[in-house]
Amino acid sequence: MGSAAGERTDISNIGLYSQASWNALAPYVSVTGGARYDYHSIYGGQVSGRVGVVSNPTRPLHLKLLYGSAFKAPSPLLLYGVPFSIGDIVGNPNLKPQRVDTVEVQATLEPFKDLLFSTGLAYSRLLNQAEFVQQGFNSIARNLGALEALSWESSVRASYQKWILGYTTFELPVVTRSLGQTGYAADLVGQGNVIYPSHILRVGISGRVPRLPFKVTFEVVQVGSRRASDMNILDNAGSYSLSPYALLDASLATVGLELLRHRETVILLKGRNLLSDPTPDPGFAGVDYPRLPLSVMLQLRQEL
């Protein structure tokens, strides 16, 4: 990657991963653990790992406890980017790598063959969070502090044989941040959640068309309000939120079609944002991203 005109910077990352499992007390307790060592040409040795404990104390109940950590080096663009026009990214070679630790607990209950309930909590702590800040007419990434996120996700799935499947999922994230700075900008943006929606609700149903080789799917997604990005809050000289919105998607796909003998052919017709909801998504550089209007996609997939 070129860091400036006439200069070149080579970046390498070598990783070594190992994993072990213990199932002596299955199905009551099963344990899986793994460790990873990365040697990055800029950041040196980095160790991360994961461990998972799974239990099935009774037939309809499954319990899961997970812990994992990860290391992520900044991309070459964030480290050595050279702006060519207004709004481009300026490289910051002093960026530190981001590290995240996550703990997750989940319970799944299947009282009947065609009915499944699931609920879970996940907590993540991100250190050395990299965020874009304005530098003149361009943007530069800086390590601005830490982020803590607690999310609750629950779902219900029900089906009738192979003909109909319905589901509902609900996600509730709670995010707090430590910006690692004081002053006007920190007071204006605050430590609350930005960009993340207050909640996400999905309701969907899919089913086979009787006597025809087609499957029809409908999904409604309701997304709660979202605060603007830090950069846009600063440009606006005040905090503001984007409105909640709802999307309707639908698809029609072939099932069991074989244009080639014993090779499945799938023809998929998919529509996104069928109600043409215009609500934008949080953006940067003073602009919130417009949502794509109603769009239709036709796809052909052939097994060879």
Image: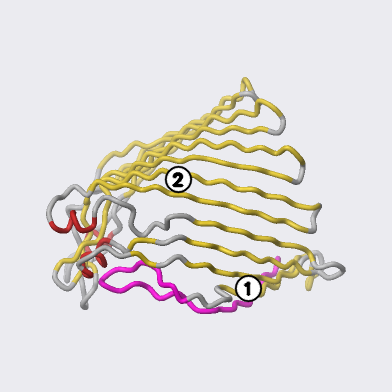
Q: Nearer the viewer, residue 8 or 61?
A: 61
Q: Position of residue 53 (x, y in %)?
A: 54, 29
Q: Which residue is mark 2?
A: 151
Quarter of the image with the N terminus is bottom left
Q: Is residue 70 left or right of residue 79?
A: right
Q: Quadrant of residue 50?
A: top left
Q: Residues within 10 Å of mark 2 (few under 14, many from 20)?
A: some
Is residue 289 rendered magenta in the image? Answer: yes
Please name the residue shown 19% across and 66% down the image: 134
**Mark closer to the chain start, 2 or 1:** 2
Which residue range is magenta in the image? 278-304
Q: Is residue 142 left or right of residue 116?
A: left
How far apart, in angstroms, are the residues tagged by discs 2 and 1? 30 Å
Q: Which residue is mark 1?
A: 270
Q: Nearer the viewer, residue 3 or 265?
A: 265
Q: Which mark is drawn over residue 289? A: none
x, y percentage for residue 16? 40, 39
Q: Amino acid at mark 1?
A: Lys
Quarter of the figure with the C terminus: bottom right
Residue at point 57%, 58% (across, down): 202
